[in-house]
Amino acid sequence: MSQRNIFSAIDIRSDKIICLIAQELEIINRGKILQLIGIGISKLPINCIKPLSLPHLEISDYIKSAITKAEYEANVKISDVFVSISENMTSEYIDFKIENENNLIGEDHIKDFFRSKLFTGLYTKLKEPLHSFPISHRIDNKKSVSDPIGMKANNLLTKWHIISVSKDYLEIIYKTFLEMDLNLKQIVSSNYSTSLAVLNEEESDQGAITIEVQKNKTVLSYTFDGQLIGFDIIRIGTFHFTNDISQIKSLTLAEAESIRKKIDFFDKDKKKDKELDKYYDIYLSRAEELTKIISITVMKSRFNSLVSNSIILTGYGAKSINIQRLIKNKFPNSSFRLGSTRKINGSKTFLDNPSLTSSFGLLSYATNHDLEGEKSDENPPKKSTLSIIYNFFRNL
């Protein structure tokens, strides 16, 4: 063993704050291995929908608690953190064209986007770019190619998928971690980090939809050729199941949440339970509504033909056998599976838990991506030889 690097990730979600600490070990004859060494979880109040809307000291205490637990387990003190967020993000597409006078295209031509007014103009008083994905390339106004590097062209048109985040929201996050004397290395969209955790190489290249059932919403992330090409948000999550049971049966949210979790694993066709039967139809009605909206959203998406080969269900509500069954039925022609974390060593109890995938994906991001703020190193060109996506985007 010759080298040991420490990475820490903090996932800010509406159900909990999760802190993960991992060590990257370089093993002789085996290369680099990412090993989980510490995990800390702070559960947020049941009625919490947007964590950073909580009083500042309160949310800071929850974050500190998760960090302290992870540091104790890992026996290290962290100073640098990667943070994932799931709120206040928007998506847009930008075409960037360069003139090249029939010269060879190099990496710098792709990166010229980050020196352009198109990119710098994304920094406004209201928002800032968080991620930039080059999702298609077009040469000389007609030829779509996967990797333009090394090709001669008079001009190159690249379509970029930009994910931006509210500037006020960013300021709250930076202030919170600055007060903790922690260096915030990068903020990452949980949509993106989840896809990094659960998709295998084939799914990422050939097209997949990651369905992440969170507490306050459900996010559909569309990945093709290794790029996050888009996402949709459905404003239904596990809290709505809990709130339905609470309101209809006059129960506290805590009581209703306990019942919801039990119904997640309740198969009415195989087992009778008089107590759960009283709430099952309420739960099922909301589950059917959610899966119907998911199906309609995917069908209406312009990315449907590219990504519907594989459906991966993950997130806080993904353990529900009822939701799993309903989604399988909605997508009978797609490969379906439950999402779990890949490429990280650790307890299978954690790695197989779909509720933790966005957190583990953040660790994968930390170890495999250049910082997006460093423009000279950002977004290397795609290596894939696939071309279908580029023809698809020509008419967008």
Image (spheres, rainbow, N blue to C red):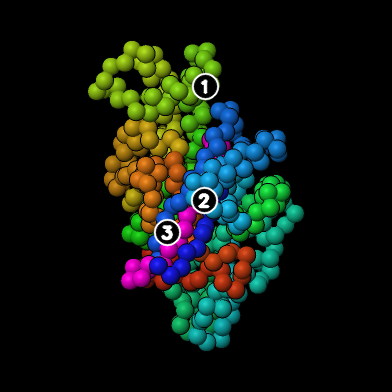
> Identity of the amino acid at label 3?
Leu
Mark carried by residue 75: 2
Work out whether residue 150 can be spotted: yes
Is residue 19 at least partly visible in the picture? Answer: no
Q: Farthest left residue?
A: 270
Q: In which quarter of the image is residue 372?
A: bottom right
- Cβ–Cβ below 8 Å for labels 3 and 1? no
Q: How far apart are marks 2 and 1 (CA)?
A: 34 Å
For disc 1, the marked residue is 254
User: At x 50% / y 85%, what residue is drawn?
Assistant: 104
Foreground label between 2 and 3:
2
Residue at the right extreme of this rendering = 125
| Region of the chain picked out in magenta, as a range | 13-31
Return the residue at label 3: 34
Of callouts 2 and 3, the N-terminal one: 3
Specify the amino acid type for callout 1.
Answer: Ala
* Crowding near the residue tagged with mark 3, few <14, some 14–19, many ≥20 C-alpha atoms within 10 Å: many
Q: Tell me, yes or no, whether the highlighted magenta stretch contains residue 28.
A: yes
